[in-house]
Image (cartoon, rainbow, N blue to C red):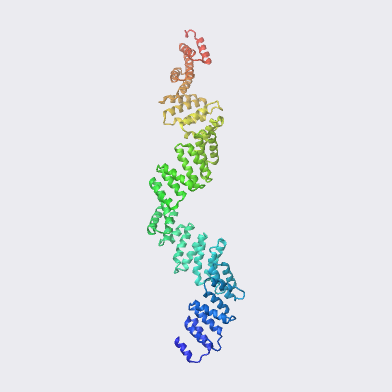
Amino acid sequence: MFALVTALAAITVLPADRLAMADRLFDRGLYAEAKAEYVALEGAEGVAPDDILYRLAECESALGDKNAAKKAYAALLEKHPLSRHAARSRFMKAMAEEGEERKLSLRALDSDATPADIRAAALYHLGAEGGDANALSRSIALDPSGRYAPYAKYRRALANSSSKDPAVRRQACNELLEIFYSGKDDLSAEALYLAGEISYSDKRYASAASIFRLFMKKFPASEKADGARTMAAWSEYARQAYSEAALLASDGATDDRACILAMSAYATGERAKARGLMLAYLEKYPEGKHRDSVALPLARIDFENAEKAGDAAAAVEAAKKACAVSGAAADMLRLAWAYEKGGNAAAADAEYGKIAVSFPSTEEAAEALFRRAMAAIREKKWSRAGLFLAEAEATGKNARRDAETKYWRGVAAVMLSQTEEGASFLRSALEKGLPPDLAREARLMTADCDYAGGRKEAAKKEYAKLVGEGAAERMGAQKLRAVGRFLLDGTVLAPMPEEAKKCALAMTAMDNAEWRQAGFALKGAAEEALGATSAAAESYRAAMAEKARTEDLAPAVLSLGVIESKAGNHIEADRVLKECVSLSRDNASRRADAYRWLARNSEAMTDYRGACGYATVILTLFDDEELAKEAKQILERHPEASK
């Protein structure tokens, strides 16, 4: 090119032609050579001085010498302020400046006096450098088909991507997709990737997955293609398309994809596979950015495995690891549970206490307090249990266990002899809905409270209803006996022998001979009340056959003796009634009744001497007018036998 310059100097060439040749050098990127030609043309006839100064400034700018370019543009503007190149020179001078000086110069171009394309360029740079979406929008409006319009749209979308307004972010995403589909080569990839990032950030995961997959297809050689694959995998994972996420992350080649692969397996319940992948992740990426995200579910898997295996020690260790990673109340609950299962009640109670203090007014705090109460109930520490249950309710987050909490508060109150308060809690628990077993117990205890509070009619009705519903099968022996006898008692409402019999039947099926005997005695009494005398006699005989001697035996034997006597089985009646006398050593009233029936039975057998003997015993030993009257009548009917 130096040869060309030398040749041009040796011949005669019109300045305009030489200028055109220099311009061609500039257009070919030969800026230094073009500059030399422009310098040679300074002062040439027929060439405008401002044209030469402008071209020299452009060369300095193209050569990257900002200071020289700034001076050159400044010189043009000083010497030729009205030049056709003035506006462009002001813009280029501003671009050669830095910092606040640059901003001030660019702002000065935001004027109606500035040509639209130059003004649009200035606004673009102001908006791009300051993240000013408004300036970028004005740039687009001024020159919608201009050189800077697509870049301004991209920059505006970039600025709006961090807006707090979802609608603005959504619009930014749409603009980026428009840029991509417009085919602007130098912006398409960037615009598409950013659209995917905005969609992901806005939790529009299906859209994000689609965009990142499109990026992988359209720009496989891009340096961002691998990142797009990772983001597509994260998007699929976030929208719970775990199989798709696992497929995209199947190589596990990066920290992210190895994590996604493991977490997808965990999310689909493939615990064994997930555990193996998690261990592999931690080995490959010991300081990985997702270390905690992997370590936490791994610890929870180990906890689940230990729980299933009944290994309390392993469960404690796994729960400790989970707590160390998350510090979450849910993991602390698991740790407390593991301590409890392992028999470390003190550690469990301490952990539950920490949860209640560290996470007040939460569901976890309510659960921790409830479990502390259950531990206290197992130890029969009723006052402590009631306190924890009250605190659980006070959290306001006890909805899941509301009915149970009121039930156990009722139980605790009853055990502390706070009967009326206990009954109130139990009724409230029943209103809220309890599981069948607890509901039955609550109703039984409520009936007990009614009985203790003198509301015996209500108690009797409820007992009868419960027994009729099958509650007898699950009641304890002592409760069965008490309820059965109460139901059979006619002093409060009419006797309820059918329900009393169900209580008795439940007792007769027990392993304990004493309770069986009491059950048969009650059964016989119920059957007598029903008029089934023969069945009653069989029940009484079954009571006598048991190898036990309970307080219920003597009344049963007396009743059997009476039945036998009335049935004309006098010899058997005599034997049984004598057995009753023997069993009633400590019960004068029953013994007197047995003697009366022995007297009657003897008289019925025409054993008048025996009848008079029993009558004499009654008159001698018992101060009972009715018995005495009957005994005298026997003696009066058989004066000879009484001598």
Task: Please indicate, yes or no, whether residue 5 appears anywhere in the rendered image.
Answer: yes
- Identify which residue, 103 or 113, lies in the foreground: 103
| 565 over 135 or under it: above or below | above
Q: Residue furthest right?
A: 112
* Count of numbered labels shown in the rendering: 0
Indicate the position of residue 75 as horizontal and vertical percent values. Answer: 54, 80
Position of residue 307 relative to residue 483, above or below, is below
Q: Position of residue 515 (x, y in %)?
A: 44, 29
Q: Quadrant of residue 543?
A: top left
> Relative to residue 333, is residue 453 depicted above or below?
above
In the rendered image, which quarter contains the N terminus?
A: bottom left
Query: In front: 474, or 610?
Result: 474
Where in the figure is residue 538, as x and y percent of width and height?
Answer: 45, 25
Q: Is residue 178 visible?
A: no
Residue at image point 55% right, 85% down: 49
Q: Residue 199: percent from the left, percent from the top?
A: 52, 62
Work out which residue is located at the far left of the displayed protein and give it: 283
Residue 499's place in the image compared with 80, above or below, is above
Q: Residue at x 57, y 69 (%)?
A: 135
Task: Tell which of 1 and 622 is nearer to you.
Answer: 1
Name the residue located 50 percent from the left edge and 85 percent from the top edge: 39
